[in-house]
Amino acid sequence: MSRAVQGAACAAAVVAAVTLLIYPLQDLDPGVSSGVLYVLGVLLVATYWGLWLGLATSAASAVARHHRRRRDPGAGRGSAAYLNRAASCG
């Protein structure tokens, strides 16, 4: 397997692993700090495989994070939506 294919597989695995790690914790995380985990994965890939694969991993991470946050109706609407959601949970 070529180095580029190995890098692409690692990038996909990193994005999938972070997404699967964050998914069960989404009720505890207001959504702001979850991006840090994606950044760590991007840094790992960019350090080992280079800039272009790091940029591709960054774009894939942004799409995954946006898709995950898009399903949350209160996402991206500021602290008022977060406080209303927290108050309704008890």
Image: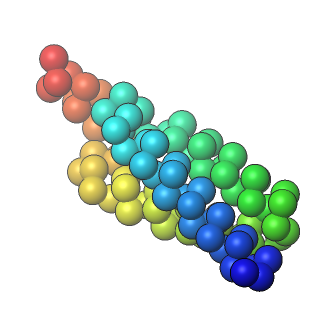
Picture quarter with the N terminus: bottom right
In this rendering, is residue 86 above or below 13? above
In x, y percent, where is residue 85?
A: 22, 32
In x, y percent, where is residue 39?
A: 66, 50
Give the residue at x 33% y 59%: 70
In this rendering, is residue 13 above or below 4? above
Give the residue at x 25% y 25%: 86
Q: How is the image coloured?
A: rainbow
In this rendering, is residue 79 above or below 23? above
Give the residue at x 37% y 53%: 69
Picture quarter with the C terminus: top left
Residue 51 located left or right of residue 54: right
Examine the rendering and report whether any part of residue 68 can be seen.
yes
Give the residue at x 54% y 37%: 33
Instruction: Name, please, the residue furthest toward the front.
Output: 1
Q: Nearer the viewer, residue 77 or 50?
A: 50
Instruction: Name, please, the residue furthest toward the top.
Output: 90
In x, y percent, where is residue 52?
A: 78, 75
Residue 87 located left or right of residue 5: left
Quarter of the image for residue 3 reads bottom right
Examine the rendering and report whether any part of residue 76 can be seen.
no
Q: How many marks?
A: 0
In this rendering, is residue 23 above or below 2? above
In x, y percent, where is residue 34?
A: 51, 41
Residue 64 located left or right of residue 77: right
Residue 22 located left or right of residue 55: left
Q: Nearer the viewer, residue 21 or 5?
A: 5
